[in-house]
Amino acid sequence: MNMELKQPLRAAKSKYAIVDCDIHPRATIEDLRPYLSNHWQHYVQTYGMRSRHGFAKGYPYPKPTPLASRRDSWPPTGGPPMSDFNFAREQYLDFYGISCGIMNPLTPSGQGDQNSELSAALTFAVNEWQVEDWVRRDPRLKASVVVPYEDAQASVKEIERRAGDKNFAHVLLLSRTSEALGHRRYWPIYKAAVEAGLPIGVHVFGYSGWAMTGTGWPSFYLEEGIENAATSQTLVASLVMEGVFEEFRELKVVLIETGFGWVPSLGWRLDKHWNRMRDEVPHLKRPPSEYIREHFWVSTQPMEETEKPDQLIDVMKWIGFDRLLFASDYPHWDFDDPFLALPPALSEVQRRAIYGDNARAVYGLA
Amino acid sequence: MTTNGLHSIDCDVHPTVPDIKALFPYLDEMWRESIETRGILSLESNAYPPNAPITARPEWRGPKGQAATSPAEIGRQVFDRWQASLAICNCLYGVQLVLNEDMARAFTRALNDWIAREWLDRDPRLRASIVVPMQNVDMAVEEIERCAPDRRFVQILVLAMQEAPLGRRQYWPIYAAAERHKLPLGIHAGSSYRHPVTGIGWPTYYVEDYAAQSQGFQTQLASLVSEGVFAKFPGLKAVLIESGVTWLPGFLWRFSKYWRGLRFEAPWVDRPPEEIVRDHVRLTLQPFDAPDAPDLVERAVEHLRCDDMLLYSSDFPHWQFDGDDVVPAGIPAGLRRKILVENPIATYARLKAEAPEEGAR
C-alpha cells in the first residue's frame, strides 16, 4: 500500500509538534453499553435518542457524505469513521505525526437530547468510553468532558467527577444550545470549569429547539454550514454582554469549527453599540472586544480562504496570532490537511504558535 | 464637489409615524374603528425601542421625544446640513409584525399612502421605499403593483428577519415584480419577530438584539444566493440597509469555501457566491462597524474588494455617529465619491433618470 511507504516520510516532515484541537471519535451504542444502566440501555433501545428536531434517524440537513465523513475514513473492521483505534492511528495520528489530538465526540453523545436524564447518562458513558477505548491506548489523545449542558447541575456533577484527571482537556459544549450561552442558567458550568482548571470548548452544531436562524429554517446543508458562524457570533456576544467574564475572570473559551473571519468584525460591532448603550449593561467594565481578545481562542478549520492571501493574514493579526489553534476535523469531509492548511505567508514563529504552542498554553499541555 | 450635478444621495433616512392616528386618513372605517375599540396603541417595533439611544440622537428629539416626524426635520439635517441632493425614506413602523394578514395589508397600504401624501408630496427631494406586507405574498405583489406607478417609490422594503428566509421560492413572485418595475429589494435591519432574533433564542439585552441584526443579514444573503434568486432574476439588486459592513468579507470567505464543497446542493449557483454578491448586493454605509481608526477603516473596506458596493447613508435620525461624520474617516477619496452619488445612481434605476449628465448644472 502506498500509505506504508509514505507514512514515515510524512511523519518525518512534521517538524512541528502539532496539536490538533478537533478530532471526532465516534462511539456506537454497543461501545457505550458497559457504561449505561439497564434502564438507559432499554430506553435507548426503545425510544431512541431524540434531538430537538424531527428526524428519528439522521439530521434535518442531510450531510454531504455518510456521517459527514471522508470516504476513505471508514475502517476495514466495519464500524463508522474513527471508531477503530488502530485504523485512526494509522490513517491520521501516525501518518501526520500528530503530537496531541483533542477528541470532541459529537454523536451519539446525548447532548441536547429532549430527555435531560438520558443526556446525563449518555454524556457520562461517552466520557468513560473516551478514556477506556482511546486515551488508555494512546497518551497523545485527550478526552473532552462532554456535559449535558441543558441541565447545569448534572453538568457540574460531571465536571467535578473529571476534575484533576489529566486525560481531559476541556469541557465540551455545542454551539446550538436552547438559550445563548451567556444566560445565567449555564453559569454553574463555567464556575465548575474554572474550578477544575479546564477551558470551555464550544463546537458548532447541535439543535437548539428554535428555528435554525432568526428568520426561520433555511433549505440547505450549505446554509447550515454558514449559519454555524452566525450562531457562534451570537453566543460570543451573549457570553460577553451578559458579563460572564466579569464573574469568571479565569474562564477560557475555545471556539471550534466556527471559522474566525468574523471575529474582529463582531468585536468592532459590539464595541460600537456598547459605546452608545453601555447603560444597559453596567456590569461590563471594558469594551466587548477586550473581553473577546482576552478570553477566546479559535480553531482554524475550516480555514478561511480569502481571495487575497494578505487579507487572511490581516484577520489573523486582528485576532492575535496567540489565539489561533490548529484543527483538522478528522475524519470529517471538510478535513483540513495539517501540512497544507496553514497559509504559506505565515512566519516560522506564527506557524509554531498555531500548530501547537498556543494549544499547549491554553490547555496546559506539557 | 458634485457628481452628475448631485452632491450626495442619502439612501437611508427614517420618517417617524408620530401617532397611529396619523394613518387614520388612509385607513377605511373598519380599521379606524378597530384601532379605537380594541385600544391598539401603536405598531412601533421593539427593534427600535422609542427611547433607546440608537432610535434617535438626543439633540434631534422633539418635545415628545420623537425625531424625524416631519419632512422639515429631515430637510434641516439631511439636506441643509449634510447637503444631500436626494434622500430615500425607509419607514420602520412595525406593520410587518402584524399577525392578521388583512390587518397587515390595510396598515401597509395606509403607511405607503401616508408616505406619499405627507412626505413625498411635501419635499421633491424625498424618495421612498414601498413597504410590503410579507405576511402574504399575493398581497405583497398587489402592493408593489399599486405603488410602482409612482416613480418616487424607488425600492421595496422588507425586514432582515421574518417568517422564512427570503430566498425561499414562496417569495419569488415578489422578486419578479421588483425586477419588472426596476425596484431593488431593500432589506432593512429589524424583525417581524416570528422567531427569536437568533437561532439560539432570545437575547437578554437590547444591545444584543441590535448586534444580532448582522447575523440576520448573513442568513438572508446565504438564502438569496443559495436558492438561486439572482440566477432566476438577473436584473434584481438587493440593498442591505443598516446592516453594518465589516462582517461581509468574512461571511463571503466562508460561504464561497462551503459552496466549493457543497455546490451539488444548489447547481444553479454556477459561480462563487462572492462574485454574485458583488454583482447584485449593495450595502448602506451607516452604521459602519469599525473603530475610529482611519487606517483600519481603509483596510477593512479593502477587504470588500469592490468599490461599487457601498451606498451613502446617514441613517437619520438613528444615532450611529456623532457630529457630521456620516462618511467615516479612512474611506479613500475616490471611493468616497462613488459612495456619495455614483453607486446609489447605479443601484436605483429610478434615480438614474433624474441625474443630469456631469456638468449639465
Image (cartoon, coloured by chain):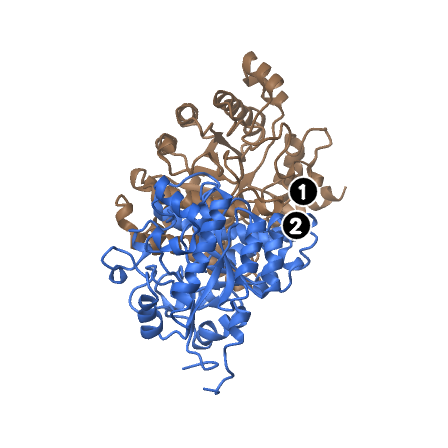
Chain colours: A brown, B blue
Residue A164 found in image quarter: top left
What residue sits 36% from the left and 65% below the top? B293
Report whether mark 1 lies on the same chain as mark 2: no
| Chain letter for the residue marked with disc 1 in the picture | A
- Residue A269 location, quadrant: bottom left
Q: How crowded is mark 1: few (under 14 residues within 10 Å), some or many (20 or more)?
A: some
Q: In this view, does B91 lie above or below B165?
A: below
Residue A114, percent across and down?
Answer: 51, 26
Query: Can residue A335 be spotted in the picture?
Result: no
Q: Where is residue B292 in the image (x, y as percent from the top left)?
A: 34, 64
Amino acid type at mark 1: Pro
Between A307 and B90, the one nearer to me in the picture: B90
Where in the figure is residue B306, as x and y percent of width and height? Answer: 53, 68
- Front-most of residues B40 and B128: B40
Contact (Cβ within 8 Å) of mark 1 with mark 2: yes
The quadrant in which the N terminus of chain B is found is bottom left
Give the Cα separation between the discs numbered 1 and 2.
9 Å
The local secondary structure at tag 2 comes to helix
Q: Name the residue under label 2.
A: B261
Q: Is residue B195 visible?
A: yes
According to the picture, the residue beneath numbered tag 1 turns out to be: A64
Q: What residue type is labelled 2?
A: Gly
Which chain's residue wears label 2? B
